[in-house]
Image (cartoon, helix red, strand yellow):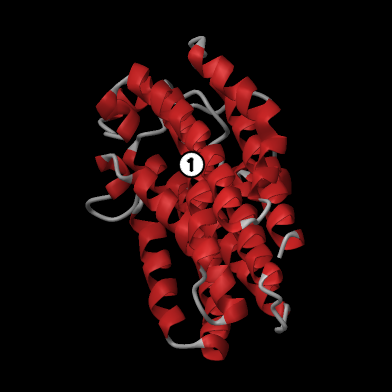
């Protein structure tokens, strides 16, 4: 085990394991999806938006704990890993405790999601069940798809399209094209976080046999992929404004963070340097996403 010095304890330890820097991936799609509903003049029960946010946050935390547990027991988080604290890999928390934390978080997402399904419609049960299964099998189960280079697909679909369009759906009870288009940007911002995370972990994942997309396509192409994702997300926001007159272009407020991240990746940042890039990518996601949400809501 690679227990780091001066490790946090108690609540701080569990908060570190929950990886709060990843939470914008849950907040942004709900904000954008709700903004579309506001722009459409939604007259609905806004507690549903709060419930959708709880589901998204609980699912994100659940996936973080599940990944911590699964990677830890598989031995993927070895001494070669450079990145945020892992509870199991560091030896600070027993695997069973982390698995229970993941199960509890999945349970919260499932229960609150079920309430929304009862109110909105049974179709949400299907979406919810798919989200829970996908969250666990990302790195868990006999054939985790995160080890096959498909993690980016999961993030784009569930923390981009499903979360954004789903939030609009629970508020309006119908799918809107604006939400679907905006979800592309949201999904790309969320996926960029995973790309940076996997870029940083290429050396350790290669040794552990974890075939992430970054391992499969190599360092150079992973860097290019990150840049293209950031550029494409902003391009979609601009095009959405041109086509729909919704001010999704407000997402450009986050360009300073985007450029800092792109510059660091293009100059070859590696290892611990990419932890800083991960933070910049999270800030870009949060600023771009919330600005897009505000623009869409105010221009309805």
Left/right of residue 9 with respect to residue 174 in the rendered view: right
Residue 296, image x, y percentages: 68, 58
Based on the displayed image, in which of its 4 quarters is residue 259 positioned? top right
Q: Residues within 10 Å of mark 1 (few under 14, many from 20)?
A: many
In what quadrant of the picture does the N terminus appear? top left
Q: Nearer the viewer, residue 292 or 20?
A: 292
Give the answer, above or below, for where 53 lies relative to 91. below
Q: In the rendered image of this protein, does residue 209 appear above or below residue 190?
A: above
Question: Tag 1's secondary structure?
Answer: loop
Position of residue 150 measured from the top left corner of the image (x, y, whole percent): 30, 45
71 displayed left or right of 23 = left
Give how far across and how far down residue 297 sits, in percent.
Answer: 72, 62
Which quadrant of the rendered structure holds the C terminus? bottom right
Residue for badge 1:
88
Q: Position of residue 168 (x, y in %)?
A: 58, 71
* In the foreground, 238 or 29: 238
Residue sitting at 62 percent across and 78 percent down? 171
Say which residue appears at 64% left-offset and 41% top-offset: 21
At x 57%, y 16%, the residue is 263
Which residue lies most toward the right here?
298
Count the marks: 1
* Farthest-out residue, top: 267
Q: Is residue 300 left or right of residue 88?
A: right
Residue 185 visible in image? yes
59 lies above or below 67: below
Quarter of the figure with residue 126: bottom left
Q: Of 134 and 121, which appears nearest the observer? A: 121
94 or 78, which lies in front? 78
- Quadrant assignment, res 172: bottom right
- Residue 276 seen in this snapshot: no
């Amino acid at each position: 085990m690679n227990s780091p010095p001066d490790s946090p304890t108690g609540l701080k330890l569990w908060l570190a394991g929950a990886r709060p820097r990843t939470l914008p991936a849950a907040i942004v799609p709900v904000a954008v999806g709700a903004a579309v509903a506001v722009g459409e003049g939604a007259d609905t029960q806004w507690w549903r938006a709060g419930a959708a946010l709880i589901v998204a946050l609980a699912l994100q935390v659940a996936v973080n704990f599940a990944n911590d547990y699964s990677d830890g027991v598989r031995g993927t988080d070895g001494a070669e890993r450079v990145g945020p604290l892992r509870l199991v890999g560091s030896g600070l928390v027993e695997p069973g405790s982390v698995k229970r934390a993941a199960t509890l978080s999945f349970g919260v997402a499932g229960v609150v999601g079920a309430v929304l399904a009862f109110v909105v419609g049974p179709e949400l049960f299907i979406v919810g069940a798919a989200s829970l299964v996908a969250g666990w099998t990302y790195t868990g189960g006999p054939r985790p798809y995160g080890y096959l280079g498909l993690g980016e697909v999961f993030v784009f679909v569930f923390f981009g399209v499903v979360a954004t369009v789903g939030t609009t759906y629970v508020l309006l009870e119908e799918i809107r094209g604006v939400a679907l288009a905006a979800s592309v940007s949201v999904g790309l911002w969320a996926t960029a976080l995973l790309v940076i995370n996997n870029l940083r972990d290429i050396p350790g994942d290669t040794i552990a046999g974890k075939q992430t997309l970054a391992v499969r396509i190599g360092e150079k192409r992973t860097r290019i992929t990150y840049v293209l994702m950031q550029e494409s997300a902003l391009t979609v926001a601009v095009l959405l404004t041109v086509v729909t007159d919704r001010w999704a272009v407000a997402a450009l407020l986050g360009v300073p963070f985007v450029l800092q991240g792109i510059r660091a990746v293009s100059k070859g940042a590696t290892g611990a340097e990419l932890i800083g890039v991960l933070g910049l990518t999270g800030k870009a996601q949060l600023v771009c996403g919330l600005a897009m949400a505000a623009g869409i809501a105010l221009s309805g």
